[in-house]
Image: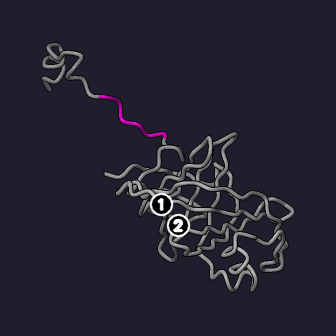
Amino acid sequence: MFDWFFNLFKTKKEEEQPIKIDYNVHDLGKGYLLDYNLESWEVLAAYTYKHKGYSSKEYKIRSSSETRFLNVSDSNSLVLGLSKEANINNVDSGLRSSVATGQPLARLTWDGDTYNLKESAEGQFADDATQDWASFSSWEYVNAANTKFIYVSKWEDNSIECYVGEYVKEYEISSILAST
C-alpha cells in the first residue's frame, strides 16, 4: 500500500534489474531447462571446445527417457547439433582402427545413410565446472542431405569416442528457462 511512498526515496543503485525472460541457446548453462521435440530437457553439464580461431559450447542434456548432447557452434553461422553416444564398432568396423592410426575413413555407412568426411580438427576441451583442459583430434562425417552427422574424437590418452546425431534449427529449441 505504501510502496509508492518508499519508492520515492529509492536510489538508482537500489532499483532491481529487469528479469530476463527471453533466453536463447547462447544463454544455456548447467541447471537450465529447455523444450525439444515435445519433451523437457535439463542441462546437466556445460563444456567448451576450442579450435583454431573459434570455440563452441556443448551441453549434456537429459529428458525423462534419455541423455543427449547439444552442440552450439557459431563460427560463421549458428549450427546446432543434437547427438548421442554410439558404439564406434557398430558404426563401422574399420572406423576405430583408422582413427587410432590417424587415418580416418573418407566415407562410411551408418543406419542406411552414407556419410562423407567433412572436417578434421584438433583442439582443446574443458568441462566448464572444473576448467581442466584436454587435447583431442576430431573427425566429422555428414550425410548427403547435410542433416545428420557422425562425430569421432580421439583424446590425448588415446581413448576414442563416437557420437551420432542430427542438425537442428534454433526454433526447435524453445522455452528456455534459467536455473533457480
Residue drawn at x 47%, y 60% is 134
Return the residue nearer the eye: 33 or 114.
114
- Circle 1 SS class: strand
Residue drawn at x 41%, y 63% is 44
Return the residue nearer the eye: 32 or 51.
51
Return the residue nearer the eye: 120 or 101.
101
Left or right: residue 150 versus residue 32 is right
- Circle 2 SS class: loop
Q: Give x and y (percent) for residue 27.
A: 47, 44
The answer to whether residue 145 is magenta is: no
Residue drawn at x 77%, y 61% is 147
Quadrant housing residue 113 = bottom right
Q: CA distance from mark 2 to mark 1?
A: 7 Å
Q: Give x and y (percent) for residue 1.
A: 14, 26
Left or right: residue 176 versus residue 150 is left
Q: Say if 96 sits above or below 106 in the image.
A: below
Chief SS of the magenta region: loop
> Residue tagged by mark 1?
134
The answer to whether residue 20 is magenta is: yes
Left or right: residue 2 versus residue 12 is left
Say what amino acid the circle numbered 1 marks: Ala
Segment tinted magenta in the rendering: 17-22
Q: Give x and y (percent) for residue 41.
A: 48, 63
Badge 2 vs badge 1, beta-carbon distance below 8 Å: yes
Q: Say if 76 sits above or below 128 in the image.
A: above
Q: Give x and y (percent) for residue 19.
A: 36, 35
Say what amino acid the circle numbered 2 marks: Glu
The local crowd at label 1, few if under 14, some if 14 to 19, many if 20 or more residues have their Cα within 10 Å, is some
Quadrant housing residue 77 = top right
Query: Does label 2 or label 1 sit earlier along the sequence?
Result: 1
Image mark for residue 171 = none
Image mark for residue 156 = 2
